[in-house]
Amino acid sequence: MPGEPGALASGVSPRFLVCRVLWRPSNLLQHLWVVLVAEENVDFRIHVENQTRARDDVSRKQLRLYQLYSRTSGKHIQVLGRRISARGEDGDKYAQLLVETDTFGSQVRIKGKETEFYLCMNRKGKLVGKPDGTSKECVFIEKVLENNYTALMSAKYSGWYVGFTKKGRPRKGPKTRENQQDVHFMKRYPKGQTEPQKPFKYTTVTKRSRRIRPTHPG
């Protein structure tokens, strides 16, 4: 309780708490544990926030092939070299996208399989294709919405989303919002292709040999 010896005051810095511990050795273990937990929680929260905003080149990258169906145009995103649209039919070669996930925070880079150009957003909020996808302008944060659609927010320009009009023309980032249908997409595998299944692995089982007990002469 406040005012009692050893009470944990609100708003007190961890450094000050350590000083109090040194002056009250009888409560050393109890207070030291509280300080460490407080610091650990703060550090972990900051670590998670940083990782969801920054690319991670150490963790294992995952590469998937699928299409992104636009809710407004009724077609699929196409990477036509430097030009981007959402007019691709199901199975169109320009609508097949290689999506690389490079952090546990769902940050992705999207490349057209046919053209090998990356989907990017420039400083004006315009969607463009670039041959080099290392820039942060080519990194998007993938958000799964409550309606099961996916939204792609620019990792560099927070609040700007990949979006298209009913005619499949790109919308500029500053004019997009997460709740707009223009920024909602559905992941689809190319026509005639199903989700790859993990191969079934067989394991060999060695038959246990019967033990022969030694006989003792009566």
Image: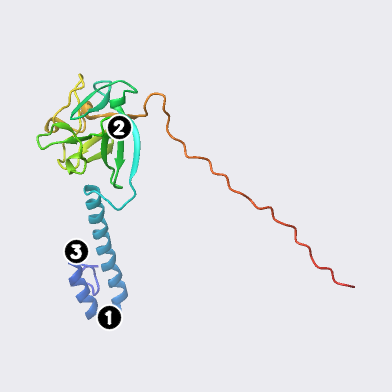
Q: Amino acid at mark 1?
A: Pro
Residue that protrudes farthest toward the left in the picture = 124
In which quadrant of the rendered view does residue 75 lie? Answer: top left
* Residue in the image at 21% along x and 48% along y: 53
Relative to 47, is 138 above or below? above
* Residue in the image at 24% along x and 22% along y: 72
Could you tell which of marks 2 and 1 lies nearer the N-terminus? 1
Mark 3 or 2: the one toward you: 2
Query: Could you give the CA–CA distance between mark 2 and mark 1, rounded to whole angstroms?
Result: 65 Å
Dot 2 alpha-carbon crowd within 10 angstroms: few under 14, some 14 to 19, many 20 or more: some
**Secondary structure under badge 3?**
loop
Q: Position of residue 93 (x, y in %)?
A: 31, 25
Residue that protrudes farthest toward the right in the picture = 218
Query: Could you give the CA–CA distance between mark 1 and mark 3, rounded to whole angstroms?
Result: 21 Å
For label 3, the residue is 10
Q: Amino acid at mark 3?
A: Ser
Is the C-beta separation of discs 3 and 2 under 8 Å?
A: no
- Of 111 and 32, nearer the camera is 111
Q: Which mark is residue 113?
A: 2
Q: Amino acid at mark 2?
A: Lys
For label 1, the residue is 25
Q: Position of residue 112 (x, y in %)?
A: 27, 32
In which quadrant of the rendered view does residue 74 lie? Answer: top left
Q: Position of residue 94 (x, y in %)?
A: 28, 26
**Secondary structure under badge 1?**
helix
**Secondary structure under badge 2?**
loop
